[in-house]
Amino acid sequence: MPAATVSSLPVDPAAIALLPGCDFADTFAVTVPQAVEAPAVAAMAFATPPDWVSALMGVRNAVMGRLGYKTAKLRMGFPVLSSAPDQVLMGLDDGHLDFRAVVRVERAAHGESRITLTTLVKRHNTLGRVYLGVIMPFHKLIVRSMLARLAARLHNGG
């Protein structure tokens, strides 16, 4: 099986509206060969991150926890703010920034589904700007890796 192609897409304005004042947003997508629903793929994508992602989140949580900010495990540990068959909205609000992850599923041709993961951030202060700058290279790798792993699992029957 060839590796899934994860693409960067323009961010849907409807997604940006989910976090008023958003000052950073990106969207990545992958197509899978079957019909799926957003709650199931969101749970699958966030349930078992690669070990290297868990290690990075551990470092992030240790540093940010010492500074008095919220910590979260990279699993469906991001609070689910809303859920529907075609979209799951997760997020956290904190002193340095507010964060949203939007998992959306659109039906594609021939029974396929396009899964998008949009990240939205509203930075509140200098720490929020510095934090986003530091994590950005990792963020893009993490999102691409999560979507590629998700597509591989779905291609192999879940």
Image (tube, rainbow, N blue to C red):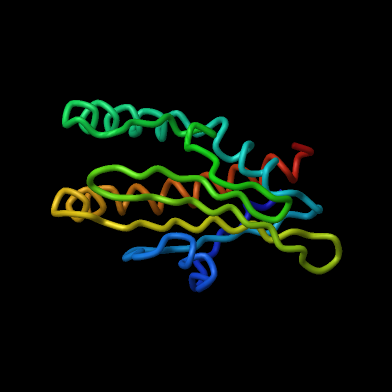
Q: Position of residue 1 (x, y in %)?
A: 72, 48
Extreme residue toward the right, this view: 110
Which of the 4 image quarters holds residue 51?
A: top left
- The residue depicted at 55 percent of the width and 50 percent of the height is 89
Q: Is residue 40 above or below residue 103?
A: above
146 lies left or right of 158: left
Q: Position of residue 20 (x, y in %)?
A: 39, 64
70 lies left or right of 31: left
- The residue depicted at 81 percent of the width and 53 percent of the height is 35
110 lies left or right of 48: right
Q: Position of residue 47 (x, y in %)?
A: 57, 31
- The residue depicted at 33 percent of the width and 33 percent of the height is 56
Extreme residue toward the left, this view: 126
Q: Is residue 96 above or below residue 58?
A: below
Which of the 4 image quarters holds residue 107?
A: bottom right
- The residue depicted at 40 percent of the width and 42 percent of the height is 92
Q: Position of residue 46 (x, y in %)?
A: 55, 37
